[in-house]
Image (tube, rainbow, N blue to C red):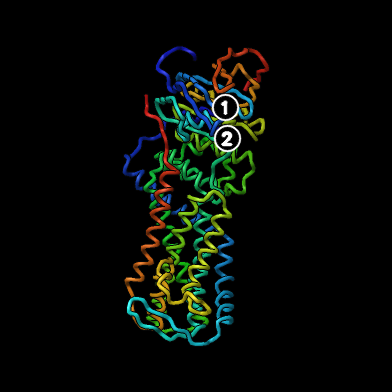
């Protein structure tokens, strides 16, 4: 899925500093429809900052980000309301995305195996289930581009595999997925891996066959 | 359920107006739920309000106090205990409503931002929150005015004036809670400002042992209007509508400040499609 065409997400010369600390120093990234991209970096490298700028929740000091189509963004820390139940979250976001039904919300809750917690408040959920809900809220409207910040933290093995099923489904339907992570266990799942170091992204070739576990 | 089920196309949308209509009731229902899930505020309401009345009445005694009505220039001679009951009611409302709204707004700020990012109309969220705060403030004010009857039975019209004053101070501090909820960086700052601000504001209006009593400086505090209206109605048998409106102006100013900052802090910086 690396054929050149009209990119669905493109970042050019993105700069961001916190005070005197320059975090991003000319980041460039081009993502095509159907591509699965990993942005890899050590703690503090600026991965979450980059993802927030790509998502549009943070303003870059300089540079440009262009998005074609709809966007789903899953932040690293679950952003949920402690006092609302899982079902209420799904209804709230279905209204936000202007979805005509909860069909896809229910399918995602079933896929990630937390439908039984529909009437439980988010404040009473385990960390892993909160993360599943967090991910669902980003996937609810079947976005053209999905940005995920360390998405599978706290997942059990079964959910981890189902997560990759969902990603595969998105890719086959031409949706792009960008995953930010500090560790890549299965490099050959990705079409492109880019290392974020010294404020810049450097592409590396996927090492096919390395520690791949089939989903 | 498999991943393939996710690929099923959604049924056709009935049109944008349908969704806008659905966004408001959803936001309204969940805003009320968020505002009423604060158990500590509920506990304060049930226990603190009557205990505070009892305590303040015991401290104040029943000496006569001179209270100036600014609208008419009239100086009323009032019972210290009854006047202090009004101050205690106003004060408990500043703490309970201010605290409940502040806590609810802070807890959901990041979530609200995510909702707006997902496509929720900011104006709809703001309207739902404002309405939820107004309903909560009015309900708590009615309860507080109701508990007052256990300690003092003013005339029905006098009681209505007190309830109206209570409702306006509750709206003012609910709006202040909203403003501080989106403005301050730490919870402690917000709680301190609400508690100390409310104490100073409401008890400076009471002439009991207060050297600033009946001085013009009192006009610059949010509880001035509600206190004047409540005392004017319950002791002076006068409806000082201008002072009630002054209290509402404080509420409107706090709410406008809070909602503007909320609007800025939750706005989406979505990129242009390219």
Q: Which residue is mark 1?
A: A180
Instruction: Please count the marks in the image.
Output: 2
Residue A104 placement (x, y as % from top left)? 47, 36
> Quick check: A171 left or right of B228?
right
Categorize mark 2 by other alpha carbons within 10 Å: few (<14), some (14-19), many (20+): some
Residue A35 placement (x, y as % from top left)? 50, 19
Q: Identify the secondary structure beneath mark 1.
A: strand
Q: Chain of mark 1?
A: A
Is any part of residue B163 visible from this angle? no
Residue B108 placement (x, y as % from top left)? 51, 48
Q: Chain of mark 2?
A: A
Badge number at residue A51? none
Image height of B134 relative to A120, above or below: below
Residue A122 placement (x, y as % from top left)? 58, 47
Q: Nearer the viewer, residue B195 or A124?
A: B195
Question: Which quadrant, please, contains the C terminus of chain A?
Answer: top right
> Quick check: A108 left or right of A182?
left
- Which residue lies at the image location 52% right of the left edge and 28% below the top edge? A50
Q: CA distance from mark 2 to mark 1?
A: 9 Å
- Which residue lies at the image location 66% right of the left edge and 15% below the top edge? A210
Q: Which residue is mark 2?
A: A76
Which comes before the other along the chain, label 2 or label 1? 2
Q: Are marks 2 and 1 in contact (CB under 8 Å)?
A: yes
Instruction: Determine if marks 2 and 1 fall on one subunit.
Output: yes
Q: Nearer the viewer, residue B139 or A86?
A: B139
Residue B242: image quadrant is bottom left
């Amino acid at each position: 899925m690396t054929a050149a065409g009209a990119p669905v997400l493109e970042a050019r010369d993105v700069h961001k500093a916190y005070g005197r600390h320059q975090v991003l120093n000319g980041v460039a990234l081009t993502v095509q429809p159907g591509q699965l991209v990993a942005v890899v970096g050590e703690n503090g490298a600026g991965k979450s900052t980059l993802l927030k700028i790509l998502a549009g929740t943070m303003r870059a000091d300089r540079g440009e980000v262009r998005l074609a189509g709809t966007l789903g963004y899953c932040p690293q820390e679950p952003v949920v309301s402690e006092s609302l139940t899982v079902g209420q979250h799904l209804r709230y976001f279905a209204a936000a995305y202007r979805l005509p039904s909860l069909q896809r919300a229910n399918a995602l809750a079933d896929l990630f195996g937390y439908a039984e917690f529909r009437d439980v408040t988010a404040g009473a959920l385990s960390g892993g289930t909160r993360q599943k809900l967090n991910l669902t809220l980003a996937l609810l409207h079947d976005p053209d581009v999905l940005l995920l910040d360390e998405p599978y933290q706290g997942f059990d093995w079964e959910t981890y595999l189902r997560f990759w099923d969902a990603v595969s489904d998105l890719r086959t339907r031409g949706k792009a997925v960008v995953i930010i992570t500090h560790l890549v266990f299965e490099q050959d799942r990705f079409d492109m891996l880019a290392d974020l170091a010294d404020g810049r992204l450097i592409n590396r070739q996927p090492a096919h066959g390395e520690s791949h576990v089939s989903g | 359920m498999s991943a393939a089920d996710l690929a099923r196309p959604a049924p056709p949308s009935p049109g944008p107006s349908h969704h806008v209509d659905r966004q408001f009731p959803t936001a309204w229902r969940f805003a009320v739920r968020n505002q009423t899930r604060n158990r500590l505020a509920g506990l304060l309401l049930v226990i603190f309000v009557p205990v505070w009345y009892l305590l303040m009445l015991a401290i104040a005694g029943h000496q006569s106090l001179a209270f100036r009505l600014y609208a008419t220039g009239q100086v009323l001679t009032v019972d210290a205990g009854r006047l202090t009951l009004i101050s205690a009611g106003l004060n408990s409302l500043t703490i309970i409503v201010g605290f409940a709204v502040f806590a609810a707004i802070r807890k959901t700020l990041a979530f609200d931002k995510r909702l707006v990012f997902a496509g929720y109309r900011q104006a709809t969220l703001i309207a739902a929150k404002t309405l939820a705060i107004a309903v909560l403030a009015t309900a708590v004010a009615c309860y507080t005015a109701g508990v007052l009857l256990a300690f003092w039975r003013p005339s029905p019209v006098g009681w209505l004036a007190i309830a109206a004053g209570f409702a306006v101070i509750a709206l003012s501090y609910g709006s202040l809670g909203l403003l501080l909820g989106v403005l301050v960086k730490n919870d402690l700052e917000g709680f301190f400002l609400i508690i100390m601000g409310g104490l100073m504001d409401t008890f400076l209006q009471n002439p009991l042992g207060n050297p600033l009593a009946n001085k013009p400086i009192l006009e610059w505090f949010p509880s001035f209007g509600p206190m004047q209206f409540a005392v004017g109605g319950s002791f002076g048998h006068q409806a000082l509508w201008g002072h009630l409106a002054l209290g509402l102006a404080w509420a409107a100013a706090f709410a406008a400040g809070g909602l503007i900052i909320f609007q800025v802090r939750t706005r989406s910086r979505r990129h242009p499609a390219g």
